[in-house]
Image (cartoon, rainbow, N blue to C red):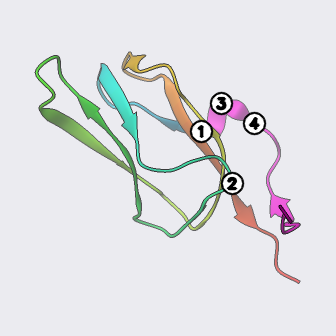
Amino acid sequence: HAFESIRVKGDGNTDAGITAPVGGYFTTQVNVGDRVREGDLLGEILDLDAIPLSEIRAPQSGVVMLIRRLSPVNAHDTLVISASLEQG
């Protein structure tokens, strides 16, 4: 497989990731390396009965750099880290 090289902007601050607004079970809709646009659905937090509690959407366009794979989450846990693409 050939992979496309990309350059992203960011300072590597993992504390600046997208966090869970509520506790529950996080299900992902994207993978590491996916390009996303502002507002794209990244995943959902569900309750024990699989009822959606919160949608997690991309706050900016960019690339998914890290995603939480362990399903149970608490409020304020980091779920996704994305980075903006460097232009040029």
Q: Which residue is mark 3?
A: 15
- In percent of width and height, residue 66 lies at 66, 39
Which mark, by number, is residue 47?
A: none
Labelled pair 2, 1 in contact (Cβ < 8 Å): no
Residue nearest the viewer, comparing 69 with 20: 69
Labelled pair 4, 3 in contact (Cβ < 8 Å): yes
Magenta highlight range: 1-17
Q: Which residue is mark 4?
A: 13
| SS under mark 2 | loop
Residue 50 lies, with reference to residue 36, above or below; the image says: above
The 10 Å Cα crowd at callout 2, few under 14, some 14 to 19, many 20 or more, is: some
| SS under mark 3 | helix
Labelled pair 1, 3 in contact (Cβ < 8 Å): yes
Question: What distance separates the C-alpha of mark 2 from that of mark 4?
Answer: 18 Å
Q: Is residue 9 magenta?
A: yes
Question: What distance separates the C-alpha of mark 4 from that of mark 1?
Answer: 8 Å
Residue nearest the viewer, comparing 19 with 63: 63
Q: What amino acid is found at the position of numbered circle 4 in the picture? A: Asn
Q: Earlier in the sequence, mark 2 or mark 4?
A: 4
Labelled pair 4, 1 in contact (Cβ < 8 Å): no
Q: Which residue is mark 2?
A: 33
Question: What distance separates the C-alpha of mark 2 from that of mark 1?
Answer: 15 Å
Which mark, by number, is residue 17?
A: 1
Residue nearest the viewer, comparing 71 with 74: 71
Labelled pair 2, 4 in contact (Cβ < 8 Å): no
